[in-house]
Amino acid sequence: MNYRHLGKSGLKISELSLGSWVTYHNQVDLEKAKTILKTAFDLGVNFFDNAEGYMQSKSEEIMGDALLQLGIPREQFLISTKVFWGGNTPNERGLSRKHIIEGVNRSLKRFHTDYIDLVYAHTQDKECPIEETVWAFNEVIRQGKAFYWGTSNWNAQDIAEATAIAEKHNWLPPSMEQPQYNLLHRTRVEKEFAPLYEHPGIGLTTYSPLASGVLTGKYNGGAVPEGSRATLAAYQWMRESVLDKAKIAMAEKLAPIAADLGVTLAQMSLAWLLKNPNVSSVITGASRPEQVVENMKAIDIVPLLNDEVLARIEAALSGFDEDPDEY
């Protein structure tokens, strides 16, 4: 495993990490989670991502119980959570001082820990002043309940505004952003965020590296494998995006490039993300330990992506028009 700094901070984070998203509780129970997390940790992964809004907080509960039972020393791994969707009553969601502080407190209990390493504003709250949000995350850090704070699915303008507010008050600005980033979703990371890599120097912990499975190639040719997300009732809300014909067509064009390298399309897609120096960590997902092992092999594939291979990838993607509004 290789480790990168989280943006301009001193924190070192594994360049491939592991997240739970909708997998934990839906497909992964406590015993499976323990096996998956242990496999990842043994392969050098030190960052595990979660959110209060994942499966009505059940995802945090499973990951927290699994890490506790595995007995891994707390200082040897990083955990994150994201605050916004904490419940159904008015003040259990959003980015007010009240919900940020209460949301973090509840996450601490679910993780059985005294602190969260990275805490994010899960999305933008247009009903709450950004100054209040920045203050609240700094208060959480001042209380020792988190070490770094950042944003997820924010636009560059609001991240810049949050940074300016923090600097005005001598507060800690956002250290990281968690956006979607993959071969089929690139514009925000590669263009909109470009000024932010120098100042404030944010790091990226990117999600959906395989475009919800499209970049594994399993849907190529119109196939819908039994047991894939597109067939499960819990994931029907994302079926249309997963089975998008234009995306599948791109996966089909990319597959021969991976084959020529002697690797899987998924591994090539992960390795391509690691070529971006602004990415601090690529958050992978897995419902089986075998998937963790296969994903981690992407690290060894990065050197194979020379200029010629990268040019072939760009040529294959030519003409693809990504959806700028896709979450």
Image: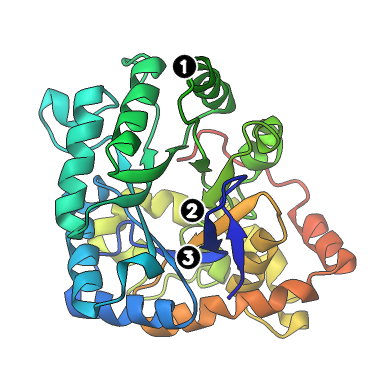
Q: Earlier in the sequence, mark 1 or mark 3?
A: 3
Amino acid, disc 2 = Tyr
Within 10 Å of disc 3 (Cα), the crowding (few <14, some 14-19, many 20+) is many
Q: Quadrant of the C terminus?
A: top left
Q: For the point 61% across and 74% down, which residue is it?
A: 267
User: In 3D space, how far apart are the residues under numbered discs 1 and 3 (Cα atoms)?
Assistant: 33 Å
* Tag shown at residue 169: 1
As drawn, is 113 to the left or to the right of 156?
A: left
- Within-10-Å neighbours for mark 1: few <14, some 14–19, many 20+: few
The CA span between labels 1 and 2 is 31 Å
Element class at badge 3: strand
* Pair 2/3: label in front: 3
Give whichever of discs 2 and 3 has the lower sequence position: 3
Residue 35: x %, y % from top left: 30, 82
208 lies above or below 304? above
Q: Which residue is mark 3?
A: 17
The alpha-carbon separation of the residues under discs 2 and 3 comes to 10 Å
